[in-house]
Image (cartoon, rainbow, N blue to C red):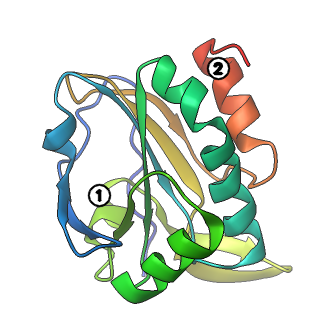
Amino acid sequence: MPSSTRLEVGQKAPSFTLKDQDGSDVSLSDFAGKNVIVYFYPAASTPGCTTEACDFRDNINSLKSAGYQVLGISKDPIAPLKKFQEEQGLNFPLLSDEDLAVHHAYGAYGEKSLYGKTVTGTLRSTFVVDGDDTIVLPLYNVKATGHVASLRKKLGIDA
């Protein structure tokens, strides 16, 4: 399966409606007029994804104070997302994209290197979308550790 097309600054963010960890619909359009950080991660409750999710959790107040809502998206079904949220005390929506349609729309699925082998899967990616649904910061193949600090620096958000 080929890699998805990558999004660039200034492009319109692909719209989506996905189920969250509670089974409720969450749409990008729910946040019209607001800044949204949409991040894609490979799998709930895995070491790197837990590190990244907890980093967002621990920084949520400063992100919200700066006007950003956080949405995490993975291919996990709802039940593992709910367990992940509860176990880690996550304070932002986790969305299920089992058919990978939104992953592909954002270019967050494709070939990557894993332990020296080329595999196809979720590309750990983050997108900052402004209130007009425009991509203002697309970040592909980010590292789980230190990602939120790097993102805050790029966005000019103080600790």
Q: Residue furthest right?
A: 116
The quadrant in which residue 117 appears is bottom right
User: How far is mark 1 from mark 2, CA to CA?
Assistant: 24 Å
Q: 90 or 110: nearer the eye?
A: 90
Name the spot of residue 58 as percent of width and height, x first: 68, 43
| Residue that appears at 63% across and 15% down | 157
Task: Give the side of residue 12 with respect to residue 45, left or right.
Answer: left
Q: Is residue 123 above or below residue 128?
A: below
In the picture of the structure, the residue carrying the numbered disc 2 is: 154
Q: Is residue 30 above or below residue 74?
A: above
Q: Is residue 118 above or below residue 56?
A: below
The quadrant in which residue 131 appears is top left
Q: Amino acid at mark 2?
A: Lys
| Residue that appears at 45% across and 77% down | 81
Q: Amino acid at mark 1?
A: Ala
| Residue that appears at 73% across and 31% down | 150
